[in-house]
Image (cartoon, rainbow, N blue to C red):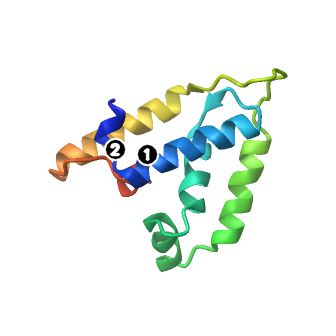
């Protein structure tokens, strides 16, 4: 999937997910990293969606933090991050949603 097919907010979320993975010394970029990045977007739609359905954002964020903390870590100076099969599958599903909805770009809603 081409990065230029993502909206600016979706690109920001992916970049933040990579930063989160590196900060936690995780080599595999997982859906949990992306979800945490989406939750951290203060002006993004993800928080609004979860608030609208009554989900406790702080508890959700802490739960995702715990999932990420339990991921395997590498002991290197610079962590090289690669896409997990699960996140690759998520991107493919998001791309199908874009086609189904006749949208032009993959947005944060599609990723969520």
Looking at the picture, how far across and down is residue 79, in whole percent? 72, 25
First in residue order: circle 1 vs circle 2 = 2
Above/below status of 109 relative to 34:
below
Q: In which quarter of the image is residue 60?
A: bottom right
Give the SS element for disc 2: loop
* Disc number for residue 37: none
Q: Is residue 23 left or right of residue 6?
A: right
Residue located at (43% from left, 45% from top)? 11
Looking at the picture, how far across and down is residue 99, in whole percent? 19, 44
Q: In this view, does 87 lie to the left or right of 58?
A: left
Residue situated furthest left in the rendering: 102
Looking at the picture, how far across and down is residue 86, in whole percent? 51, 32
Above/below status of 25 relative to 78:
below
Q: Where does label 2 land, which residue? A: 6
**C-alpha distance separating marks 1 and 2:** 6 Å
Residue located at (69% from left, 70% from top)? 58
Residue located at (74% from left, 60% from top)? 62
Q: In this view, does 77 lie to the left or right of 96?
A: right
Residue located at (80% from left, 29% from top)? 73
Above/below status of 24 relative to 58:
above
Q: In this view, does 67 lie to the left or right of 10?
A: right
Quarter placement of the N terminus: top left
Q: Residues within 10 Å of mark 2 (few under 14, many from 20)?
A: many
Residue situated furthest right in the rendering: 75
Q: Name the foreground residue: 16 vs 69.
A: 16
Q: How crowded is mark 1: few (under 14 residues within 10 Å), some or many (20 or more)?
A: some
Q: Where does label 1 land, which residue? A: 11
Quarter placement of the C terminus: bottom left
Do the residues bearing badges 1 and 2 touch, measured as CB atoms within 8 Å?
A: yes
Q: Name the foreground residue: 97 vs 26.
A: 26
């Amino acid at each position: 999937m081409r990065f230029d097919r993502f909206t600016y907010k979706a690109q920001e979320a992916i970049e933040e997910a990579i930063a989160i993975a590196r900060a936690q010394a995780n080599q595999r970029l997982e859906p949990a990293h992306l979800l945490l990045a989406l939750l951290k977007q203060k002006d993004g739609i993800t928080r609004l969606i979860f608030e609208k359905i009554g989900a406790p954002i702080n508890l959700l964020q802490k739960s995702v933090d715990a999932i990420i903390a339990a991921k395997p870590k590498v002991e290197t100076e610079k962590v090289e991050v690669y896409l997990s099969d699960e996140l690759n599958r998520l991107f493919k599903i998001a791309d199908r949603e874009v086609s189904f909805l006749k949208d032009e770009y993959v947005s944060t809603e599609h990723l969520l």
